Structures are given as C-alpha cells and as structure tokens.
Image (cartoon, rainbow, N blue to C red):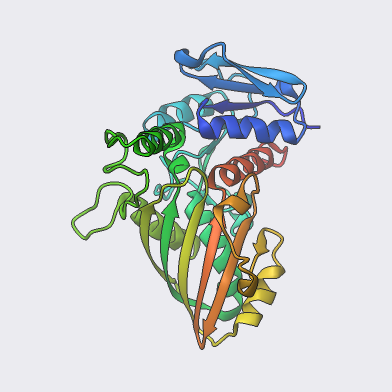
C-alpha cells in the first residue's frame, strides 16, 4: 500500500477512473484527494472499503501534495498546474494543454520512460493522448528492430473520448432513435447515434483536425531524429461508448512477415496480441474494457508493409498511466 499524497483534479469520467484505479492498487484512501468545481463538492466515491469525498479546488488545495493529476479541460489545466507547482507538487497533465509545449516532457510510459530521468525545468509533465500512447506502444518495437519509414492511421473513437457528456449524449440519441425520434444535435457536429462522423474537431485549411495534428506532432516529439517517421492520421467518431480502435498501415525500412511481427509484439508485456482471424478473434473495444494493455491483431505483412488493428480502453489506460507517472515523479529521486 502506498501513502503518497496525491490530488486528482476533475470528477468527470477520467477523474473517477483514476480514483477507481488508485483504489484497486490499494492506495491509502486518506492520502487521496479528489478536487473539482464547487458543483461537485461533497459528492462521495467508493474507494474499496472507504470513500473519497470531492472537495472544491482552490489555490491552497495542493499544499502537502506530492503529486497532482489533472483530469480537467485544457482551459483549466494551465492555471491549476501553476498553482500546484507553487505548492511544490509534481503535476501530471492528462488534458493535452501541454502536449505541444517543447518545454514540457511528453511521456508515453513503456516507450520513452527515460525522459523523466533527464533534467527538465518546471514540475509538469504531460501524458500523450491515448491514441498516441497506443499507437507508439505498438509501433516502437517495430521501429526499433526494423526501422519505421511512415505510418498512416485511422483512429475510431468512442463517445467516452468526449468525457461523460459524450457518453450521455450517445445514450440520449440512441434512445430517441429507437423510439422513432430524430435527436437534437448536441456536443458532436452531427448525431452520433447509429452514425459515424469522419472528423473529430474542426478542420484546418489543409483538412486536418486538431486531434489529427496532435497525434502527428506527438509522435514526431517521441521519435525525433535523423530517421523521423512520418505519421498521418484520420480521426472518426463512432457510436460506441468506450474504447478506441485504430487501423494502421506501417511501412518499415526492412521486409518482415506476419509471424515475425506477432512474435516480436508478444515479447512486450504492455501489449496483448489477439490474432486468430480464422476463429473470428481480433481486437475489439468490448475486449479492452478495464484493461490498460493495448490489444493488437489482424496482422498482415507484405514486404516492408505491415497492416494491423489496435484496440484500447482509452479512459482506463490514461488513468493507469497517469498514476504510474505520478508515483514515479513522487519518488525521492525526483
């Protein structure tokens, strides 16, 4: 059991999942502080045999905290990060507010763990997006052994990627459609119920959304060097509640075969190779529920080209990795 004092800011879908993950790890309930806006003040969350009560976040909320995990919108993250740093806490940002900031370490646990061992200014680190984490976790072993020239990925995101509001809107729209009603469009640009929306966020002049740009920039930060792989992305909203599925086409620098790819990926404990197409066994969102590993399958290879499917419980994985990084930062060596 760990008694490191940790503050989790945000009582939404991700914040609640972080609390559940801390409870499952038998973290001391008395050392966990759940902070949110005044609207959530006093709410109670189960914490194994105990409860955690939501407190209103303020400038003095971080005193005595060893680590602070931000599960809030990016618009709030910068102010809260500043307040937490002033209190001497380490900050793990999940919001994306700092992902493109070259002065803030971008972390993908299991891929670039050494970044936390190098000196950096400030006390804030940012986790890569769940899509980047999953993609990099699968492609890194291939890049390290065979070289990676470029990859094209289609990211299919369930409603939970938009938080609890996304889940609620999908439920509402599905119920209305099942009752013969055309639902009101809210949160998403079109109805998501029984539909797919081939753009997550507004598109720029070149046709890319911010989510797509972020994934491309984040992977470039991870793999910066003379043989930087080029990554392009397309993001799609799909009418599922939880989980993200990615269709990946990767071009390596040396030829491979499918069996060799499977064998290599099976060596990584952070991955689960689920690949028996003749038995209709392959990665699917329903298999990733409450699993923080990345599922990969439908592996095909032709010369230097590898095609595969990735599935991940994006909320559960982000929660687990945020805790991993917070505990590492709170260790005495930092």
Q: Quarter of the image containing the C terminus?
A: top right
* Residue 229, placed above or below residue 314: below
Residue 51 falls in which quadrant of the image?
top right
* Residue 262, placed above or below residue 89: below
Depth check: 31 or 38 in front?
A: 38
> In this rendering, would 281 be left or right of 135?
right
Residue 173 falls in which quadrant of the image?
top left
In the current view of this chain or complex, which residue is farthest to the top?
42
Q: Position of residue 234 (x, y in %)?
A: 35, 60
Depth check: 39 or 68 in front?
A: 39
* Residue 66, placed above or below residue 292: above
Residue visible at 69% across and 33% down in the picture:
22
Residue visible at 65% across and 48% down in the picture:
291
* Residue 60, placed above or below residue 208: above
Residue visible at 27% across and 33% down in the picture:
184
Residue 256 falls in which quadrant of the image?
bottom right
Q: How many marks?
A: 0
Q: Quarter of the image containing the N terminus?
A: top right
Q: Position of residue 326 (x, y in %)?
A: 63, 38
Q: Position of residue 79 (x, y in %)?
A: 41, 27
Depth check: 168 or 103 in front?
A: 168
Depth check: 48 or 282 in front?
A: 282
Q: Position of residue 74 (x, y in %)?
A: 39, 35
In the current view of this chain or complex, which residue is farthest to the left?
205
> In this rendering, would 89 be left or right of 153?
right
> In this rendering, would 298 be left or right of 6?
left
Residue 225 visible in the shown view? no
In the current view of this chain or complex, which residue is farthest to the right?
1
Residue 132 visible in the shown view? yes
């Amino acid at each position: 059991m760990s008694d490191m004092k940790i503050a989790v800011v945000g009582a939404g879908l991700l914040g609640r999942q972080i609390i559940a993950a801390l409870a499952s790890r038998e973290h001391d309930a008395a050392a966990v502080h759940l902070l949110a806006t005044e609207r959530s003040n006093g709410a109670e969350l189960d914490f194994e045999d105990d409860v955690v009560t939501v407190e209103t976040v303020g400038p003095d909320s971080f005193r005595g905290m060893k680590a602070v995990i931000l599960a809030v919108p990016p618009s709030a993250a910068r102010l809260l990060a500043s307040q937490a740093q002033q209190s001497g806490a380490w900050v793990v940002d999940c919001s994306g507010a700092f992902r493109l900031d070259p002065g803030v370490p971008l972390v993908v646990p299991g891929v670039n763990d050494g970044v936390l061992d190098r000196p950096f200014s400030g006390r804030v680190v940012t986790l890569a997006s769940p899509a980047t984490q999953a993609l990099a976790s699968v492609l890194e072993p291939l890049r390290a052994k065979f070289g990676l020239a470029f990859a094209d990925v289609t990211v299919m995101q369930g409603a939970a990627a938009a938080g609890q509001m996304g889940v609620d809107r999908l439920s509402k729209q599905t119920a209305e459609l099942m009752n013969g009603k055309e639902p009101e469009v809210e949160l998403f640009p079109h109805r998501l119920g029984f539909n797919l929306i081939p753009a997550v966020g507004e598109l720029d002049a070149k046709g890319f959304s911010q989510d797509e740009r972020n994934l491309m920039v984040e992977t470039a930060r991870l793999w910066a060097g003379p043989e930087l792989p080029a990554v392009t992305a397309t993001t799609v909203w799909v009418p599922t509640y939880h989980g993200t599925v990615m269709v990946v086409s990767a071009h390596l620098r040396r030829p491979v075969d499918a069996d060799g790819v499977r064998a290599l990926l099976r060596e990584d404990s952070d991955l689960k190779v689920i690949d028996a197409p003749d038995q209709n066994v392959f990665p699917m969102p329903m298999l990733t529920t409450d699993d923080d590993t990345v599922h990969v399958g439908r592996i095909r290879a032709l010369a230097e080209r590898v095609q595969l499917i990735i599935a991940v419980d994006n909320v559960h994985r982000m929660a687990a990795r945020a805790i991993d990084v917070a505990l590492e930062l709170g260790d005495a060596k930092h």
